[in-house]
Amino acid sequence: MKKIRIAAASSDGLVVDSHFGRAGSFYIFETDEEMGDGNFLEIRKMKPICTGGDHDEKQLEKNVEMLCDCQYLLCAKIGEKTEHFLESKGITAFELPGYIDDSFLRMSRYLSVRHMLE
């Protein structure tokens, strides 16, 4: 069964509570295609790309490169331009704040419905 990696922008590893551009930590989980329980793999520390309203484009590229092995990203908020940049690198972002387990479940349900409609 194919493995899927999910990055969660979180301050504590329990809750998706960080804006993508302000996140300093991404918790990486691995699961299977059925999106069962995610197995925690590691924390990836990154320099936030958004500081005081300014966006560091080079840092954005570095951060996305550090997440390039993930297929999905969960965050509390993300800008449209950044979301499109992630998509161009094969990463689908979801704004799903809340407990990580709940966010996984909501993402899984959405993907299941989308797959049925394709």
Image: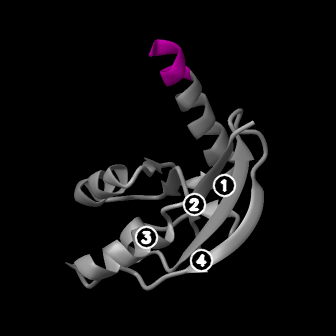
Quadrant of image for the C terminus = top left
Say which amino acid is labelled 2. Answer: Ala
Q: Quick check: 31 left or right of 60? A: right
Whether the residues at callouts 3 and 4 have beta carbons within 8 Å, the answer is no
Which residue reaches farthest front? Answer: 1
Q: Nearer the viewer, mark 1 or mark 3?
A: 3
Residue 25 position, x and y percent, is: 56, 77
Q: Determine contact: label 4, label 2, CB under 8 Å.
A: yes
- For residue 55, what is the image quadrant? bottom left
Write the start and end of the magenta stretch as one range. 113-118
Say which amino acid is labelled 1.
Tyr
Pick the front one: 118 or 112: 118
**Which residue is at a point 54% across and 64% down the rendered structure image?**
17
Of discs 1 and 4, which sits in the foreground? Answer: 4
Image side of residue 80 versus residue 65, left or right: left
**Which mark identifies residue 44?**
4
- Can residue 12 be seen at all in this image of the molecule? no
Which residue is under mark 1?
99
Whichever of callouts 4 and 2 sits on the residue coming sooner in the sequence is 2
| Closest to the observer, 97 or 114 | 114
Q: Amino acid at mark 3?
A: Glu
Q: Earlier along the polypeptide chain: callout 1 or callout 2?
A: 2
Q: Which percent across, then down, holds residue 18?
A: 49, 68
Which circle's residue, 1 or 4, is located before the other in the chain?
4
- The numbered disc on residue 65 is 3
For the point 46% across and 14% down, the residue is 117
The CA span between labels 2 and 3 is 13 Å
